[in-house]
Image (tube, rainbow, N blue to C red):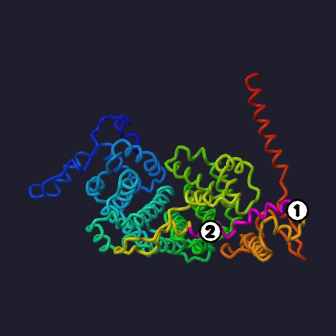
Amino acid sequence: MNFEDTYDDDLLDGDLPQMRIEDYEVDEDDVDQSRYIASAQSSIPEVVKQFVTYLNRYIKEKNVYEIFSMYENNFNKIAERFYKNSPWPSAEMIGPIVNQDPAFILLYKELYYRHIYTRLQPTLEQRLESWKNYSDIFNWLQKSGSDLAIDLPSQWLWDMIDEFIFQFQSFCQFRSKLRSKNADEINTLKNHPQAWNIVSVLGFLQSLVKRAHTLKYLENPQNLKQEDLAVASHPMFKKLGYFCMVGLVRVHCLIGDYRTALKTIAPYETSSHKSEFPQVIACHVTLNYYLAFVYMMLRRYTDAIRTLTAVLLYISRTKQYTSKSQQSEQIGKKTEQMYALLSICLVLCPQRVDENIHSTLKEKNGDKTIKMQRGDESTFEELFSFACPKFITPAAVDLGSENPTDALKNQIKLFMMEIKEQDLVPTIRSYLKLYTSIPSAKLSNFLNLDPSAFNSQLMCFKHKTLELGYMGGDLVDGEWIKAGDVDFKLENEMVTVVDTRVPRRYSDFFIRHIQKFNELSGQLDGPHA
């Protein structure tokens, strides 16, 4: 018997009262806390009690299939019906239902606070309580070993790490808005300096990666000791180690430490054992989004284009599996951001991409691409602001300051400095594509530049079209490659153009269209057959 067999769907559609903790305020001078909890507990709908009971049972039984079903479907269905504008019952009210099971209460509170962040506006106290709960969960996991008695679905574990970083990001943004804080809130923040601290957040993620022996497993599982291999092979630790690595990439990217972000994921990207780790679609999309953004900010446009093209094709192939998922909205937003990043990268480093990607890109950002090719800096800034992560300041905000640092503005400023440095690169490229050779004096006249300024711009073109690229081996250092679709040599005041474009593969083009033609023919002939 499972959870769905124990209740009628009409319970979720009926007019049961919506539990609100505010409806059960009591006078503490007359009624003790236990009677208050008992009174509030009586308001919990029966279907919620059954949900909690069966979820606790399945977690104890390590029934991952049923846990996933309840987590992905029933939890959201119940939240939509009963707690659309209010929190779930508190852990104190749920405790007696599950015999005060400490592990379950920790996991329930994680869902409880996540619901508040999703549908309500968390208070400062709730932000601090959520931090304490995550700390308790991670400390419990760090102390556990291969005897860990639970196993959660990959989707839940990824959502937990993803939500942990989101709440950290949200707290940093909340903390930076000093003018909206009253004196009590500022004092509370001063009294909790470790709450959502960057050092603590990174420490938890790194500790879980180390506890799961993820790096050693990626290098070679056979090098692990027997007891370490037992931990690394445990389903929970294998999932958590990988998800925390992705989380570290995201955090380092949010604080603008792009090289460290690349170093963090390098062992996974270059490992021959990466296929042994769980593949959650939302995690895969998130990883490649941040990886592509890191490449772009490190001026490795070819690698960024390769990463973006691969993940966008992956999203199009898996769309049928994510359309009804709870992550569909998040994946859709990331898709739009990645198309914006791809537009920027292709303007800075023109090259051919998959025909389907190119068509979609033209529909979404065709006009903006033309503006960027003409040097419109406002369009670059607009697309970058839309596509970039919500950056945070890694250092704790000075609570006595009225002018906290705006991390987003700093990153936009750095990006626009790079754009301004190669302001004439698209123009020079357009002229070079018209000639096989041209006197440098004639080209400088086209650009209205004196010889010294023109030579500087040619060197700038050389520099900006030379970048690191991943050619196997070390992901971080890479190898220097010539990017873009055109190159030149300058000898004896003569500019000789070298076309570096990759020849178009016409066979793929015709095969694809023949397949489409055959499909259309079959559809047209079908009714007459």
Number of other residues with Cα within 10 Å of mark 2, as a class: few under 14, some 14 to 19, many 20 or more: some
Q: Position of residue 349 (x, y in %)?
A: 73, 63
Front position in the image: 122 or 432: 432
Disc 2 element:
helix
Q: Position of residue 225 (x, y in %)?
A: 55, 77
Task: Please indicate whether residue 13 sits to the left or right of residue 455 in the image.
Answer: left
Quarter of the image with the N terminus is top left
Query: Magenta residues?
Result: 413-435
Instruction: Determine the residue located farthest toward the top in the rendered image.
Output: 528
Residue 448 found in image quarter: bottom right
The amino acid type of the residue labelled 1 equals: Tyr
In the rendered structure, which disc, 1 or 2, sits on the residue that comes first in sequence?
A: 2
Disc ID at residue 297? 2
Q: Which residue is mark 1?
A: 435
Main SS category, magenta section: helix
On whether residue 145 falls in the magenta region, the answer is no
Disc ID at residue 379? none
How far is disc 1 from disc 2 in space, using C-alphas? 32 Å
| Marks 1, 2: nearer the viewer | 1
Disc 1 element:
loop
Q: Residue at x 33, y 43 (%)?
A: 82
Task: Please indicate whether residue 494 sits to the left or right of residue 326 in the image.
Answer: right
The amino acid type of the residue labelled 2 equals: Met
Quick check: 396 above or below 243?
below
Front position in the image: 236 or 341: 341
Residue 285 found in image quarter: bottom right
Whether residue 3 is visible, yes or no, is: yes
Number of other residues with Cα within 10 Å of mark 1, as a class: few under 14, some 14 to 19, many 20 or more: few
Q: Position of residue 134 (x, y in %)?
A: 39, 65
